[in-house]
Amino acid sequence: MKKRFWDALLIGGCLLLAAVLFLVSHLGREAGAGVIVRVDGEEVARYSLYDNGTYPLNGGTNTLVIENGQAWLSHADCPDELCVKQGKVRADGQVITCLPNKLTVTVYGGEKNDVDLIS
Amino acid sequence: MKASKLSLLALSVSLAMILSFVESQIPAMVAIPGVKVGLANIVVVFALYKLGWKEAVVISLTRVFLVGLLFGNGISILYSITGASVSFAAMVLLKQAKVFSTMAVSVAGGVLHNLGQIAMACVIMGTDVLRYYAPFLILSGTLAGIAIGVLAAIMIRRIDLKA
């Protein structure tokens, strides 16, 4: 079974690639400062993660809730509501996506700069 | 084209379509866009080994197009076509290499399918923030590929088309 070696190499390689990409994007991640809402690739709004509130997005197709440094979508007009199920985000770089409405909510900024200044 | 072959292709497309439909009725298990098992690919992998790559292309693309028309929309066809093409190219190349098992070929198909879809999603959504999902989709593509590969290998072993 020489194929075993190549199989293991390929499958191991895929898992390793996933792990490395995961670590690269998750290590040293800071709590975000706010979220950027993009529709169709255009930035349409920005909200601070510390301004608690409920905001209708994209003319009401999705509803954004911000509470104590966390953001999530509480409603979507599509049947699967996958964006609602994606849950809460709060760390720099995290994304909530609504494919049908071409809408993304991305967490930006962190306290990295402040930490660098102190250290 | 012989009638027997035409029927076989038609049967394969129907089976792939049924599997797509069955899968569409299962609620999303993970809240990450694009994560699924891809049951219809059992038929595509089977066809790749038993009928040849040209036949498998025909089955795959016909399935994507018909399922898109019946249950999806223009955008969903675009996602599927990208995923299916990239995935298929990877599977044909790896099969040609002759050092991989059916399962590994299917894993490459699953991973490339998902990466192709992220790339297409970035184009459609006009933003590259979706790369955030890449590690999750590589992992899910690998697991789905293993499952599909194992199932397809059983079918390849058990079903004798010449009978």
Image (cartoon, coloured by chain):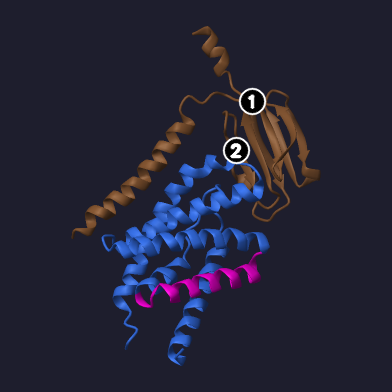
Residue at image coords 66%, 38%: A105
Query: Going 57% across and 15% down the picture, which residue do you hit?
Result: A113
Q: Which three-letter amino acid code belongs to the residue tagged 1? A: Gly
Rendered location of residue A14, percent (x, y): 37, 47
Give coordinates of residue B84: x percent, y percent.
Answer: 50, 62
**Numbered marks: total:** 2
Instruction: Identify the colour of chain A in the image.
Output: brown
Q: Is B23 rendered above or below residue A7?
A: below
* Amino acid type indicated by mark 2: Val
Find the residue positioned furthest to the right: A59
Please give the range of residues in magenta. B50-73
Q: Is residue B143 left or right of residue A56?
A: left
Whether residue A87 is visible, yes or no, is no
x and y, in percent, of residue B103 in the image: 33, 61
**Label 1: which residue?**
A69
- Is A31 above or below relative to A57? above
Q: In this view of the protein, can residue B86 be seen by the observer?
A: yes
**Could you classify mark 1 by the number of other residues whose Cα lies within 10 Å: few (under 14), some (14-19), or many (20 or more)?**
some
Pointers 1 and 2 in contact (CB under 8 A)?
no
- In the rendered structure, the colour chosen for chain B is blue
For the residues tagged 1 and 2, is the chain the same?
yes
Q: Secondary structure at mark 1?
A: loop
Give how far apart the Cα atoms at labels 1 and 2 are: 15 Å
**Magenta stretch prevailing secondary structure:** helix
Marks 1 and 2, the one that precedes in the sequence: 1
Residue at the far top in the pictured view: A118
Per the image, the residue denoted by label 2 is A95
Q: Chain of mark 1?
A: A
What chain does badge 2 belong to? A
